[in-house]
Image: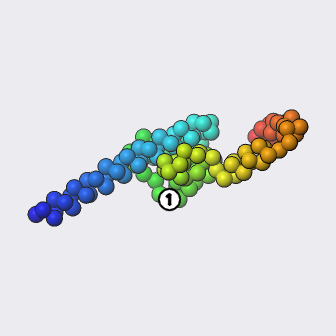
């Protein structure tokens, strides 16, 4: 009887922990999506899920598969570690490399770089 009680307590703790993870993950996805200026509908379409499912994920009601997490992180330009709350660094490796390159760039090229970025933004 005691063993069964201990098993049930452990099961309840696991369920509570998963709900906390889902809530944290959902919040991070919602924040990253808004910062990326992407609608829920557009992200859902890009990762092949329904907008309703994505809304439930963002609300912490359901979790996602590893494949879906990977697609979300790619589409939002953040790491899966950031979405899972394992790091506060929301930038991808490519973004970090770019930032480091800019930091090491001679200041006289900042104007040229800025104009290049503005032209790329115009391309969409």
What is the secondary structure assignment of the residue under circle 1? helix
Left or right of residue 105: residue 11? left
From the image, tell me which residue sits under label 1: 66
Left or right of residue 120: residue 69? left
Find residue 2 and report its horizontal and vertical position in percent.
12, 62
Left or right of residue 118: residue 69? left
Q: Is residue 33 visible?
A: yes
Left or right of residue 123: residue 28? left
Binning the other alpha carbons within 10 Å of mark 1 as few (below 14), some (14 to 19) or many (20 upward) gives few
Find residue 87 and report its horizontal and vertical position in percent.
53, 49
Which image quadrant is residue 114 in?
A: top right
Find residue 7 and report its horizontal and vertical position in percent.
21, 61
Q: Nearer the viewer, residue 98 or 46?
A: 98
Report the number of numbered marks.
1
Which residue is painted at 86% across and 35% down in the image? Answer: 111
Which residue is painted at 36% across and 52% down in the image? Answer: 18
Q: Is residue 67 above or below residue 50?
A: below
Which residue is painted at 58% across and 46% down in the image? Answer: 89
Q: Is residue 52 visible?
A: no
Q: Quadrant of the N terminus?
A: bottom left
Q: Quadrant of the C terminus?
A: top right
Q: How is the image coloured?
A: rainbow
Which residue is painted at 88% across and 39% down in the image? Answer: 109
């Amino acid at each position: 009887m005691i063993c069964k009680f201990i098993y049930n307590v452990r099961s309840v703790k696991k369920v509570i922990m998963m709900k906390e993870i889902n809530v944290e993950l959902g919040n991070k996805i919602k924040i990253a999506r808004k910062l990326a200026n992407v609608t829920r509908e557009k992200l859902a379409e890009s990762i092949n899920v329904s907008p309703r499912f994505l809304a439930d994920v963002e609300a912490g009601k359901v979790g996602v598969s590893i494949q879906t997490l990977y697609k979300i992180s790619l589409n939002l330009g953040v790491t899966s570690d950031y979405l899972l709350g394992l790091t506060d660094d929301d930038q991808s490796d490519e973004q970090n490399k770019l930032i480091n390159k800019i930091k090491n760039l001679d200041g006289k090229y900042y104007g040229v770089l800025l104009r290049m970025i503005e032209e790329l933004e115009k391309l969409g």
